[in-house]
Amino acid sequence: MIEPQIQEELKQKLFEEKKRIEDILSKTETGKKETDREYETAFPEVDRDEEANADEMDMYESNLAADEAMKSELEKIEKALTAIESGTYGFCMNCQKEIPLARLRAYPQADTCINCDGK
């Protein structure tokens, strides 16, 4: 069981990471409209230059992938914060063993132990 002081420290780290990601997303989603996690595409630079169009599409796809990865991290953070409130934080969702404190300090939103990570 995680000591209350350490749990509070990890909770603060989760809130800080949540805010950091939300700040990044609020800047990167400027000009994009989200509907059910799909984006309306608007390419103001589209012209007859196929290479420029391809570059813009690559940048759009790269930004979209980064946004989706950050949204996934936000979901993990929310789950970790919920687990803290419900008293289930710090236990592997696969094997139900305690997640080592060193792992939680490095990655507070971890929901699996190292042995189960990637299974």
Image (cartoon, grey):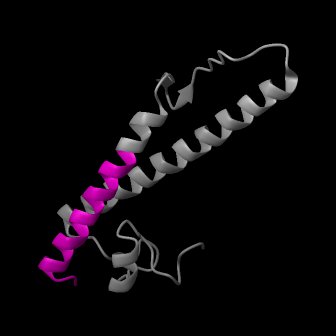
From what the image shows, is residue 110 above or below residue 97? above
Residue at point 56%, 26% (across, down): 39
Range covered by the magenta-colored residues: 1-22
* Membership of 4 in magenta stretch: yes
Pick whichever, 9 or 93, lies toward us: 9
Report x, y in % for residue 69. 53, 50
Q: Quadrant of the N terminus?
A: bottom left
Residue sitting at x 33%, y 57%? 17
Above or below: residue 103 compared with residue 55: below
Coordinates of residue 50 in the picture (x, y in percent): 86, 23
Would residue 53 be found to the left or right of residue 26 on screen?
Answer: right
Location of the C terminus (image quadrant): bottom right
In percent of the image, x 37 and y 82: which residue is there? 99
Residue at far left of view: 4
| Residue 37 rendering spot, x and y as whole percentages | 51, 32
Which quarter of the picture shows residue 63?
A: top right
